Image (spheres, grey):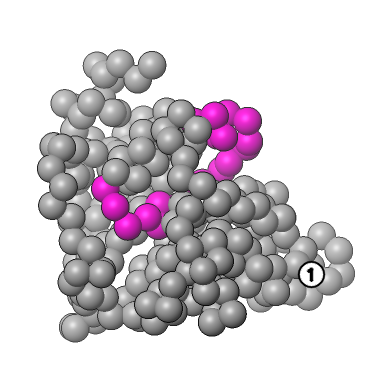
Amino acid sequence: MNDQDLERYGRHILLPEIDYDGQQKLLDSHVLVVGLGGLGSPASIYLASSGIGELTLCDFDKVELSNLQRQIAHTEDKLQINKAHSAKSFIASINSNININAIDKKLSQNEFDSYLKNNSVDTILDCSDNFQTRYIVNKIAFKNKIPLISGSAIRFEGQLAIFDFRENSSACYECLFPDNGEENELRCADHGILAPVVGIIGVMQALETIKVLLNLSPSQNQLKIFDGKSNEWKTILFKKDKGCTICSSSSDHS
C-alpha cells in the first residue's frame, strides 16, 4: 500500500480484526458480483469503497427508469445503458484505484465455469433476481470451491445466506431451496419492493464478503431473514442435505 491507500483505508486499518495485513488482503482479492440491480448496487459500491482490489460485475440487462427507485449504482443519464457498464462507471468514480471488469452478457453455466477457471476469483455474490441464475451460480461456485454470498428481497422482506464451499461441511443453495423445476418465484415487478430493504441486504452481502475474505467467522449454514416492518432479524439453521444432487458426497459433480 502507498500513502494514499493508508489514508483512504485508515479507518479499516485501525480495526484490530483488519489491520494493515487484512486491508492488503482485501486489496489482493477478486470478487465476482452477479446482478447489478437492487442488491448488487449497494454491495458492489461498498466492496469498492472498502478496497476490494478487483471487482467483476456481471449483468446483461439495461437500466430502466423503474430501476432508479432502488438500484443506487445507476443514474438518470445511464438509462438504456447496460447495468454492468453503468455500475462500473459509478463505482470507478468512488474508487479509481481498483480494477473493475464488466461482463454485459447472460452467461451460461459453461461460460461461468470457463470464466472461473481462467480467472482467480475469491468470492461470488449472487445478487440475481431469479432461481435459474441462482441455481447456476450455486453449481459453479460449489464446483470451483468458491464461497458464495446469496441475497434476495421482496416486498418488506429480505434473505441472506452464506455458503463457504472451502469447507466440506457447507450446505449449498439447493440444500436450502431444492430445484423442483417449478417457476413460482416472486418478482419485484409483480409484488413490489421497499427500496431500503434491498439496500440493507446488499450491504449485508458486502459485509459477509469481507468477513469471508478475512476469515472472520461468517454466518455459515444460516438463513437470515429480515423483516422491514418490525426491523427484526430471524435466523434459521440448516444442514447439508445428504441427498442434494449438487453438494452431497454421493453426487456426480463432473
Q: Residue at x 66, y 68 (%)?
A: 89
Where residue 140 appears, as percent x and y from the top left, is 42, 33
As drawn, is 5 to the left or to the right of 183? right
Q: Residue at x 40, y 69 (%)?
A: 38
Where residue 153 appears, as percent x and y from the top left, is 28, 66
Segment tinted magenta in the rendering = 113-131
Classify mark 1: residues with Cα within 10 Å, few (<14), some (14-19) or many (20+): some
Relative to 111, residue 84 above or below: below
Nearest the viewer among 239 and 254 is 254
Q: Residue furthest right?
A: 3
Nearest the viewer among 55 and 24 is 55
Name the quarter where the C terminus is drawn. Answer: top left
**84 in the magenta segment:** no
**Residue 18, visible in the rendered structure:** no
Indicate the quadrant where residue 172 lies. Answer: top left
Q: Residue at x 52, y 74 (%)?
A: 79
Name the quarter where the N terminus is drawn. Answer: bottom right
Disc 1 target residue: 6
